[in-house]
Amino acid sequence: MSVSVDPPIRVLLADPHALFRRGVRLVLEDEADIEVVGEAGDGLDAVERIVELTPDLVLMDVGMPGVSGIEATRRVRAAVPSVKVAILTVSEQDEDLFAAVRAGATGYLLKEVSIEELPEAVRAVARGHSLISPSMASRLLTEFNVLSRRVEEQRGNVPRLSDRELEVLRLVARGLSNRDIAAELVIAENTVKNHVRNILEKLQLRSRMEAAMYAVREKLVDAT
């Protein structure tokens, strides 16, 4: 009686440092159920390689040259939704974390992750779990809690957004940049900036991430 064996998890490494990619490859290829199918050293090449190879999972650095890791993640998720992206970076900046989540990343790991933890992290994300380094997860939770309290306080007294501002807010919640929003709505990028500023002022929010979370909370966009 034959025993079915699951195919290995196909991983692509996107990082500007060849030496780091080699180290991660050696760690992952020591695992029988993980296969590294490709590498990329810049963002645009990463997107092209991912579309070509359709791996199960991409480990993507934020600081990719050319096209950033955040923008590359956004493009990959739009072009090949089945591919999961986990950010693997040294950046502990809140904005990078929030931007990665908006762009569709399902993991945000710091490069301080141990050799033993990395393969398990790959397996978890490949299985569909969201995985964020504990120190970063606490920041995301704190930000969400702050926003939730602020939204509750404002309920029943929220300034009305114009139709155009609602359009911009929905696109912000989808993770689009000002340039992408301008192209989508066929308006000037400076006009988008003005709309975003007005939205934040009207809703008394501090950042695009808070605006995106507000849009999800108010069911202006699909949370999935």
Image (cartoon, grey):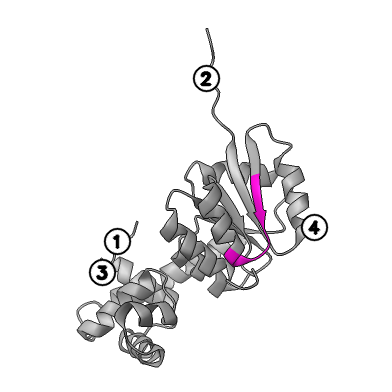
Q: Return the residue at label 2.
A: 4
Q: Return the residue at label 1.
A: 222
Give the extent of the magenta segment.
Answer: 37-44
* Foreground label between 1 and 4: 4
Element at label 3: loop
Element at label 2: loop
* Foreground label between 4 and 3: 4
Q: Using the image, tell me which numbered label, if any, was put on residue 161.
A: none
- Residue at point 24%, 77% (across, down): 155
Q: Position of residue 9 (x, y in %)?
A: 58, 39
Distance between mark 1 and mark 3 Cα atoms? 7 Å
Q: Return the residue at label 3.
A: 220
- Residue at point 37%, 68% (across, down): 174
Q: Amino acid at mark 3?
A: Leu
- Residue at point 41%, 73% (across, down): 176
Q: Are marks 2 and 4 in contact (CB under 8 Å)?
A: no
Quadrant including the C terminus: bottom left
Q: Quadrant of residue 120?
A: top right
Mark positioned earlier in the residue sequence (4 or 3): 4
Q: Are marks 1 and 3 in contact (CB under 8 Å)?
A: no
Distance between mark 4 and mark 3 Cα atoms? 44 Å
Distance between mark 2 and mark 4 Cα atoms? 36 Å
